[in-house]
Image (tube, rainbow, N blue to C red):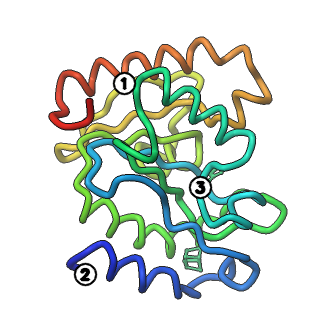
Amino acid sequence: MYTNWEELKQECMLCNKCELGKTRTNLVFGKGNENAEVMFIGEGPGENEDLQGEPFVGRSGKLLDSMLACIDLDRNKNIYIANMVKCRPPKNRDPLPAEQDICINWLREQVRLMRPKIIVCLGRISAQRLISPDFKVTQQHGQFIDKKGTLFMGTFHPAALLRNPNNKPAAFDDFMALRDKINEICERTY
Ligand code: SF4
Ligand code: URA
């Protein structure tokens, strides 16, 4: 249990609790306002993220930032972005369940300290882990689910939107619903 963000981050940055620690260039702890009311959770660092130590800085990150901007969200101001695992899986494979099981403890501490009102899961990996094991993004995206007072919503992963732009309108609908929900329940995001 950590009492503050800096202590948590310092300890996490040294982590070698799973195999992914051996092959990383940089650990990607997360980026944004640690007092935010809205948190976004992706899958894991890719090549660019591993090199720069920041989440979503490649092509999918550019798309994410532009979608966020549409609803006045900005990683440098009013949200926080993290991933299910903090070190890059080799060749961008899915993080293994065992790796997620270990790494999720860091994320749990981040959530515990931040106490976000809304958590947005970007893609299947985080949605199945944080919302429900059989979550289907194509069918359940955009729905808000209350878990112990925190609202969870799953939507398309930006990399999936780059591969399949047909889903972009649906993803934008999810972001509009998110904006409405923020207006309804958040006090200091907008
Ligand atoms: Fe530690 Fe997570 Fe990196 Fe594994 S992926 S070494 S658990 S920070
Ligand atoms: N994809 C993710 O899931 N997370 C990142 O940080 C980058 C790409």
The extreme front residue here reads 76
Q: As drawn, is 152 to the left or to the right of 18?
A: left
Q: Name the image quarter holding residue 64.
A: top right
Give the camera-side residue of 167 and 147: 167
x, y percentage for residue 181?
Answer: 27, 23
Alpha-carbon span between mark 1 and mark 2: 31 Å
Vertical placement of 37 versus 65: above or below?
below
The C terminus: image quadrant = top left
x, y percentage for residue 179?
Answer: 34, 22
Query: In the rendered image, which residue does mark 3 sit on?
Result: 55
Query: In the rendered image, which residue does mark 1 sit on?
Result: 178
Q: Ligand 1 is in which quadrant of the figure?
A: bottom right
Q: Nearer the viewer, mark 3 or mark 2?
A: 3
What amino acid is labelled 2 in the image? Met
Instruction: Say few, some or many: other residues with alpha carbon within 10 Å of mark 3 (under 14 / 14 to 19 / 20 or more).
Output: many
Of helix, strand and loop, which one carries label 1? Answer: helix
What amino acid is labelled 1 in the image? Leu
Alpha-carbon span between mark 3 and mark 2: 24 Å
